[in-house]
Image (tube, rainbow, N blue to C red):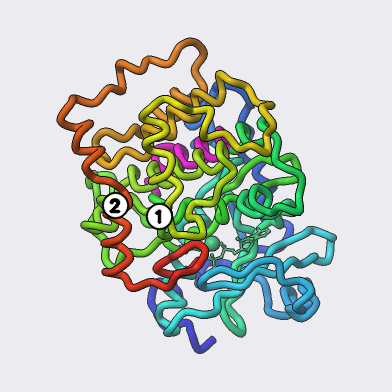
């Protein structure tokens, strides 16, 4: 247990170890939320639901479950973790996230505590639930296994059949609800800071679940926004005020959610081969109202036009340069879900703001971002390549 030095880590694990039988029921049971247009109302119901519980596993348990962390069980790799599929003795499928490649042990602890402290205390059908952790022989987080992988893998893998519109719409609404819950529904507000399609996992029935809380922050209720250094996240998803000034609030996540909407509509990756961002490409098209041009050709014209218009309009609001003119997640859900005509007037910006929005051509900002962070030109450029 050589990593366990910080007081918070000690305190955390001085809690009574729970038995396997006490492990939280799956999210569908512990957060009994109805389907339909009830997203906002249901947040209150969720608050009253039982708190999630999780257990400490022994290293032996997780090693047995993953076949000794065999490479055959490796299902994903991010910037600071390797994720293995495992099966517990009672046949429950789990994902074991082994925290690996950060520079120092201290940094490892920080990411681990961050994730356990946030995801370990939330409960919503659209947020991945924590099953437990292990602090012997390294640091491990244990989750329910998402057999369908991430939204990114399903959407962008050309060897798979194209994702149909119904699924895309379901992912948009579910992710929106999960994010709204993090921002407003759970007891302490959480800013995720790394919302992107590789961090949205899918259940068997394609319900999206927000995962990877390594960068998440508690946002104290008395603060409207937070100044954060160093700036972390993924290029192509970072809101301008964040990567220019380090200012973080829930609008940072709203921006990144907008990028996911554009990704679902267009089937394009957040950053293409020539490093153009998806939002930079889509913005002028959205401003011209030429939504058809955004739509993924792999859908072959099969989509619900009203839903498409709503998602595209929500996306255009989310990627606005000024956080003040970006909607909150509850407003995004309204735009995406409410029946009837969209009230576009309500979202009109004053002329000078429109100009400002145009002026902050995203490509300029990205150039600045690129040079100041000297990041490597990977497929998805990231300050932590997660
Ligand atoms: N619960 C899970 N079920 C299935 N696959 C998972 C699960 N958690 C993570 N993965 C896979 O592992 C990848 C990396 O996990 P993530 O938590 O995002 O790690 P990092 O913090 O290093 O980015 C994900 O993109 C996904 O493909
Ligand atoms: Mg990740």
- Residue bearing the label numbered 1: 193
- In the image, is residue 21 above or below residue 336? below
Q: Along the line of sight, which residue is nearer the eye, 279 or 284?
A: 284
Q: Quadrant of residue 222?
A: top left
Helix, strand or loop at disc 2?
A: strand
Quadrant where the N terminus is found in the figure: bottom right
Q: Distance between the residues labelled 2 and 1?
A: 8 Å
Count of numbered circles in the view: 2
Helix, strand or loop at disc 1?
A: loop
Q: Dot 1, crowdedness within 10 Å: few (<14), some or many (≥20)?
A: many
- Image position of 152 (left or right of 279): right
Q: Give the range drawn in magenta.
A: 172-190
Q: Does the magenta stretch include residue 144?
A: no
Q: Which of marks 2 and 1 is nearer the N terminus?
A: 1
- In the image, is residue 43 above or below residue 68? above
Residue 297: where, in percent of width, then height? 64, 37
Q: Is residue 184 magenta?
A: yes
Q: Along the line of sight, which residue is nearer the eye, 237 or 295?
A: 295
Residue 144: where, in percent of width, then height? 69, 56
* Majority SS type along the magenta span: helix
């Amino acid at each position: 247990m050589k990593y366990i030095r910080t007081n918070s880590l000690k305190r955390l694990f001085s809690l009574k170890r729970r038995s396997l039988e006490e492990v939280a029921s799956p999210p569908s049971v512990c957060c009994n939320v109805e389907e339909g247009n009830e997203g906002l109302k249901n947040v209150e119901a969720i608050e009253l639901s039982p708190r999630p519980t999780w257990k400490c596993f022994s290293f032996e348990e997780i090693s047995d479950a993953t076949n000794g962390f065999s490479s055959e069980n490796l299902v994903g790799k991010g910037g600071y973790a390797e994720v293995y599929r495992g099966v517990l003795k009672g046949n429950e499928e789990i994902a074991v996230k082994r925290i690996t490649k950060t520079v120092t042990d201290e940094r490892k602890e920080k990411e681990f505590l961050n994730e356990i402290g946030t995801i370990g205390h939330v409960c919503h059908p659209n947020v991945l639930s924590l099953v437990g952790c292990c602090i012997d022989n390294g640091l491990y987080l244990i989750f329910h296994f998402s057999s369908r992988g991430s939204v990114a893998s399903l959407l962008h893998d050309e060897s798979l059949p194209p994702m149909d519109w119904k699924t895309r719409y379901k992912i948009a609404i579910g992710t929106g609800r999960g994010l709204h819950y993090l921002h407003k529904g759970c007891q302490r507000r959480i800013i995720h800071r790394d919302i992107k399609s590789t961090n949205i996992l899918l259940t068997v029935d394609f319900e999206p679940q927000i995962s990877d809380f390594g960068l998440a922050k508690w946002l104290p209720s008395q603060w409207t926004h937070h100044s954060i250094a160093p700036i972390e996240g993924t290029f192509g998803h970072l809101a301008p005020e964040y990567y220019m000034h380090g200012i973080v609030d829930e609008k940072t996540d709203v921006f990144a959610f907008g990028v996911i909407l554009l990704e679902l509509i267009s089937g394009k990756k957040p950053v293409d081969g020539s490093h153009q961002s998806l939002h930079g490409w889509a913005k002028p098209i959205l401003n011209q109202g030429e939504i058809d041009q955004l739509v993924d050709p792999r859908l072959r014209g099969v989509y619900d036009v009203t839903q498409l218009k709503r998602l595209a309009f929500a996306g255009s609001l989310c990627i606005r340069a000024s956080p003040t003119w970006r909607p909150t997640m509850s407003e995004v859900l309204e735009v995406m879900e409410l029946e009837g005509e969209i009230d576009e007037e309500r979202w009109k910006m004053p002329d000078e703001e429109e100009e400002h929005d145009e002026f902050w051509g995203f490509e300029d900002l990205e150039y600045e971002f690129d040079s100041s962070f000297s990041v490597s030109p990977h497929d998805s450029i990231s300050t932590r390549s997660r």
